[in-house]
Image: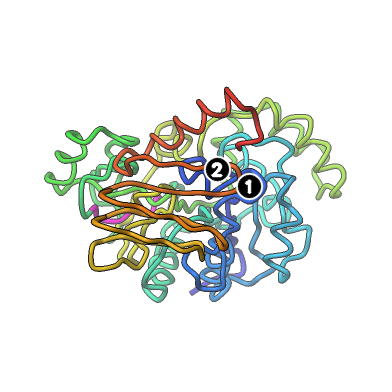
């Protein structure tokens, strides 16, 4: 049962570089309708949580340039529920700000942190798993990572090793490995001891606040100096002052590698991270040869298999004798590369940007 002190923070400030050139600086993947449902990834994430978390307790953390876009896509939110970061760092600073912000209103709050770019197949199981996790963190001063059983050795995900059972569905985290190579991933999957990290984390405000006090003492001290709820302008001034020197790490690293009181709960809601072309391809409809085509353009394939093609409306893509590739055209960038290396697109993005600048971002 969702209680009065349960809050949700949606992380929606990234660039989505591993889905470049479909994900671009002016419109990153979280603001795109990738599956033709009429709802973007951000909107689908909001829909999942707003079915059981009151709308006024849902916050979206994003880059300042995207704040208006968030409000356009989620008109249900008040602009005070959009935490607009002055610079794009990683997700740990975003979670730190959200924690301090919610602490002012509800110092004993339970917080759900979620990425904005995930697929969840079973919404009913999702709600049940979240509620079970909230009940756990309300009784335990732990961070709780939600994880799923791996189905194959995926090198794009983090792997959490389960330790001693804590309380029914929860286990102590024994180890965490971020994006292992293929041979290590195979060992992890075969062992049966490891789960995929979903990036969903639950905790009570005091649990995160204590961790932040040790890692970011100056920011924590200044935030609480007035012992009152800060005005919006006062809060923004603090963020602009301290944010650029905040922790430059992901919330996954902050919790799973930098903290000791961490538990994991295996979930069954049918999950996929839509962060790479390979993962997107697995979720898209396919023809008899395993090819997927999105974007509304014309795609003509001959002797092709297992490709993922993005062709925008008004364009045509013709391929012959190609297998296992990403072919994506958007604006001024065409990418053609194998889709079996989740880091390859990001590498290509960085190389092209060094040559041509932000016009390709």
In-image side of 217 versus 29 (left or right): right
**124 is higher (above) or lower (below) than 151:** below
User: To which quarter of the image does residue 303 belong?
Assistant: bottom left
User: To which quarter of the image does residue 5 belong?
Assistant: bottom right
> Could you tell me if the residues under marks 2 and 1 are in contact, i.e. CB atoms within 8 Å?
yes
Q: Which residue is located at x 23 percent, y 62 percent? A: 289
Q: Residue furthest left?
A: 190
In-image side of 274 versus 329 (left or right): left
Q: Where is residue 90 in the image (x, y as percent from the top left)?
A: 57, 36
Q: Position of residue 186 (x, y in %)?
A: 16, 41
Q: Upstream in the sequence, badge 2 or badge 1?
A: 1
| Label drawn at residue 208 | 2
Q: Mark 1 points at which residue?
A: 99
Q: Where is residue 150 in the image (x, y as percent from the top left)?
A: 24, 52
Local secondary structure at mark 1 = helix
In-image side of 326 versus 99 (left or right): left
Q: Which residue is located at x 71 percent, y 57 percent? A: 69
The Cα–Cα distance between marks 2 and 1, rounded to whole angstroms, is: 7 Å
Task: Specify the segment rendered in magenta.
Answer: 144-150
Which one is nearer the viewer's eye here, 295 or 267? 295
**335 is higher (above) or lower (below) than 292:** above
Q: Where is residue 50 in the image (x, y as percent from the top left)?
A: 58, 72
Q: Which residue is located at x 15 percent, y 49 percent? A: 192
Q: Determine crowd level at label 1: few under 14, some 14-19, many 20+ residues with C-alpha closer than 10 A.
A: many
Question: Any magenta on residue 1?
Answer: no
In-image side of 287 versus 349 (left or right): left
Which one is nearer the viewer's eye here, 305 or 63? 305
How many numbered discs sit on the rendered protein? Answer: 2
| Label drawn at residue 130 | none
Q: Determine crowd level at label 2: few under 14, some 14-19, many 20+ residues with C-alpha closer than 10 A.
A: many
User: To which quarter of the image does residue 282 belong?
Assistant: bottom left
Which one is nearer the viewer's eye here, 302 or 32? 302
């Amino acid at each position: 049962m969702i209680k009065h002190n349960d809050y949700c923070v949606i992380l929606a400030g990234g660039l989505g570089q591993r889905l470049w050139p479909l994900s671009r600086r002016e419109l990153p993947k979280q603001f795109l309708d990738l599956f033709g449902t009429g709802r973007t990834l951000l909107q689908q994430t909001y829909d999942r949580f707003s079915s059981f978390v009151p709308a006024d307790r849902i916050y979206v953390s994003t880059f300042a340039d995207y704040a208006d876009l968030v409000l356009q896509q989620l008109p249900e939110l008040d602009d005070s529920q959009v935490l607009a970061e002055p610079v794009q760092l990683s997700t740990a600073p975003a979670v730190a700000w959200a924690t301090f912000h919610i602490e002012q209103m509800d110092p004993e709050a339970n917080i759900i942190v979620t990425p904005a770019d995930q697929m969840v197949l079973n919404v009913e199981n999702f709600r049940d798993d979240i509620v079970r996790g909230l009940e756990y963190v309300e009784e335990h001063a732990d961070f709780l990572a939600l994880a799923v059983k791996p189905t194959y050795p995926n090198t794009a995900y983090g792997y959490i090793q389960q330790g001693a059972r804590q309380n029914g569905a929860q286990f102590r985290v024994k180890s965490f490995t971020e994006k292992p190579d293929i041979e290590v991933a195979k060992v992890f999957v075969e062992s049966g001891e490891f789960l995929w990290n979903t990036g969903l984390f639950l905790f009570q405000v005091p649990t995160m606040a204590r961790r932040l006090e040790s890692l970011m003492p100056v920011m924590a001290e200044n935030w609480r100096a007035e012992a009152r709820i800060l005005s919006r302008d006062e809060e923004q001034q603090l963020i602009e002052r301290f944010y650029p020197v905040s922790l430059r790490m992901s919330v996954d690293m902050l919790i799973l590698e930098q903290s000791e009181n961490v538990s994991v709960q295996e979930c069954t809601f049918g999950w996929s991270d839509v962060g790479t072309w390979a993962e997107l391809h697995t979720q898209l409809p396919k023809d008899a040869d395993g090819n997927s085509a999105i974007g509304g353009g014309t795609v003509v394939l001959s002797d092709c298999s297992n490709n993922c093609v993005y062709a925008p409306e008004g364009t045509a893509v013709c391929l012959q004798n190609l297998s296992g590739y990403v072919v994506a055209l958007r604006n001024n960038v065409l990418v053609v590369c194998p889709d079996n290396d989740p880091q390859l697109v990001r590498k290509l993005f960085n190389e092209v940007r060094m040559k041509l600048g932000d016009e390709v971002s």
